[in-house]
C-alpha cells in the first residue's frame, strides 16, 4: 500500500522539487499546500499518512503551529518537519508539538525515503547527525521565562548592552541587570554568550 503524502511549503518551486523526488520513489502525493491553514484543512479531508511540512511558512501558522493542529485531528498524520538550518530553535518546539522528527532540506533522496517510511510506521525520525543535539534539548529541564525576560533575552542575543536594552524597553538599567541575572540563573549560564547559546539549544530563541 502506497504511503500518501501532503507537502506543505510556501515556495512553489520547493514543493515541486520535493514532489518530483518522492513520487520518483513511489510515494503518492495527494496535495501541495502553501500555508499551515490550508494544510490542516486538506489533512482533515484527505487523511494523508505523512505530512512533509516546512518549519517556516511565512505569514500565518508556522510549522510548529501546523504540527500541533495536525496532531489534534481525529486521524492525525505523522508530521515530518523540513528545515534549512539544523540549529533552528523551532525544531525542538515542533517535536514537542508532536512532529515525528525533522530533516534538513539538503539530505539525499534515500534519507528522505527512509524517513517517510519510518514516520508512517510511527518511528522518530532525526536528520543525520541531529540525534544528540535534539535529544539533549528535549531532556533538558523546561525553562520558563517571564514575558519581560524573553524580551531581554532577545535583545541580549542581538548584542545590546544593558543600557541599550533599558532604552529599548523604557525601563531602568538596574531593572535590566536584574533580568539578565535571572536569565543566567535559569539557563545555568555564567555569561551572556553562554545564556544565548543555552537559550538556542532549548528552543527559546
Image (cartoon, helix red, strand yellow):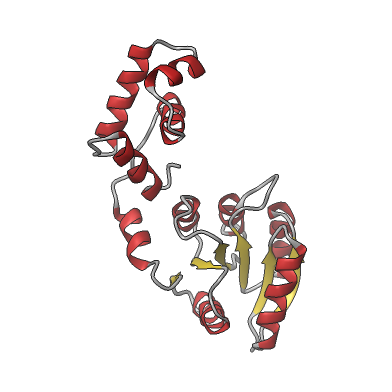
Give the quadrant of the C terminus.
top left
Which one is nearer the viewer's eye here, 70 or 87?
87
Q: Is residue 123 left or right of residue 174?
A: right
Q: Nearer the viewer, residue 152 or 158?
A: 158
Q: Residue at x 38, y 70 (%)?
A: 129
Tell me the quarter of the image containing the N terminus: bottom right
Name the residue furthest top: 172
Q: Is residue 87 left or right of residue 26?
A: left
Residue 172 drawn at (x, y percent): 40, 10
Relative to 27, 160 lies left or right = left
* Percent position of residue 72, x then y: 58, 56
**How many numbered markers are drawn?**
0
The quarter holding residue 22 reads: bottom right
Q: Residue at the location (51% across, 77% down)?
A: 115
Whole-percent x, y for residue 47 in the image: 68, 70
Which image quarter: residue 26? bottom right
Q: Is residue 175 above or below residue 54?
A: above
| Nearer the observer, 202 or 153 | 153
Q: Is residue 73 above or below residue 105?
A: above
40 sits to left or right of 160 = right
Residue 74: tell me if it is visible: no
Residue 84 visible? The answer is: yes
Residue that appears at 38% across and 21% down: 162
Q: Position of residue 17 (x, y in %)?
A: 71, 74
Q: Tell me if residue 137 comes above or below residue 150 in the rendering.
A: below
Amino acid at each position: 500500500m502506497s504511503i500518501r503524502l501532503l507537502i506543505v511549503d510556501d515556495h512553489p518551486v520547493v514543493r515541486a522539487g520535493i514532489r518530483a523526488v518522492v513520487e520518483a520513489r513511489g510515494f503518492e502525493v495527494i496535495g501541495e499546500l502553501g500555508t499551515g491553514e490550508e494544510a490542516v484543512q486538506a489533512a482533515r479531508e484527505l487523511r494523508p499518512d505523512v505530512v512533509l511540512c516546512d518549519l517556516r511558512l511565512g505569514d500565518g501558522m508556522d510549522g510548529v503551529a501546523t504540527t500541533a493542529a495536525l496532531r489534534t485531528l481525529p486521524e492525525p498524520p505523522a508530521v515530518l518537519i523540513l528545515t534549512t538550518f539544523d540549529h533552528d530553535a523551532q525544531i525542538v518546539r515542533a517535536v514537542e508539538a508532536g512532529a515525528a522528527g525533522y530533516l534538513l532540506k539538503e539530505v539525499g533522496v534515500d534519507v528522505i525515503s527512509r524517513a517517510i517510511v519510518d514516520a508512517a510506521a510511527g518511528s522518530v525520525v532525526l536528520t543525520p547527525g541531529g540525534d544528540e543535539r535534539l535529544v539533549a534539548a528535549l531532556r533538558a529541564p523546561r525553562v520558563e521565562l517571564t514575558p519581560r525576560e524573553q524580551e531581554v533575552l532577545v535583545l541580549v542575543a542581538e548584542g545590546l548592552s544593558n543600557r541599550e536594552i533599558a532604552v529599548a524597553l523604557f525601563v531602568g538599567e538596574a531593572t535590566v541587570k536584574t533580568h539578565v541575572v535571572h536569565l543566567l540563573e535559569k539557563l545555568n549560564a555564567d555569561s551572556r554568550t553562554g545564556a544565548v547559546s543555552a537559550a538556542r539549544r532549548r528552543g527559546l530563541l
